[in-house]
Amino acid sequence: GKVKKQSTGIVATDYWRVYNETIPEEKLVQTKAETYTVESYNALIRHFLARFRRNSKCYSKSSVTMELSLKLLMAKRNKLISIQSY
């Protein structure tokens, strides 16, 4: 897509008007195709990790705990580890 042809340092967004007003034109790529993967990962993370859901009382104050939670989720999703549920 458009992003692969661009150099690094670009921002891929959807078509929300505020992006045009805040991101320099030379760095902005507006296309739903380039944001689809990011949005699907965001949905996956919010589904499995309560600490990333909006309006949730489950949250981490520690960035280390958040990072480890994400790494554990991705390791499980990529079948690098097995977590048994009983």
Image (spheres, grey):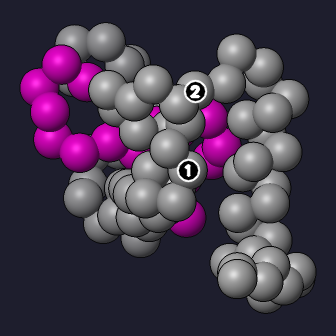
Expressed as whole percent of the image width and height from the top left, the position of residue 71 reads 80, 55
Left or right, 50 with respect to 69, comes to left
Q: Earlier in the sequence, mark 2 or mark 1?
A: 1
Sort mark 2 into few (<14), some (14-19) or many (20+) by Cα contacts within 10 Å. Answer: some
Which residue has dot 1 on it? 49
The answer to whether residue 38 is seen in the rendering is: no
Q: Is residue 38 above or below residue 14?
A: below
Residue type at mark 1: give it.
Answer: Leu
Residue type at mark 2: give it.
Answer: Tyr
Expressed as whole percent of the image width and height from the top left, the position of residue 30 reads 27, 45
Q: In which quadrant is the C terminus drawn?
A: bottom right
Expressed as whole percent of the image width and height from the top left, the position of residue 29 reads 35, 44
What is the CA distance from the residue labelled 2 to the residue labelled 1? 9 Å
35 or 4, which is in the foreground?
A: 35
The answer to whether residue 66 is seen in the rendering is: yes
Residue at 32 percent of width and 26 percent of height: 55
Residue at 88 percent of width and 80 percent of height: 81
Q: Secondary structure at mark 1?
A: loop
Sort mark 1 into few (<14), some (14-19) or many (20+) by Cα contacts within 10 Å. Answer: some
Q: Where, by quadrant of the figure, is residue 33 drawn? A: bottom left
Which residue has dot 2 on it? 59
> For residue 11: magenta?
yes
Q: Residue reaching furthest front?
A: 86
* Magenta stretch in the rendered image: 4-19
Q: Is residue 5 above or below residue 17?
A: below
Expressed as whole percent of the image width and height from the top left, the position of residue 12 reads 40, 45
Which labelled disc corresponds to residue 5?
none
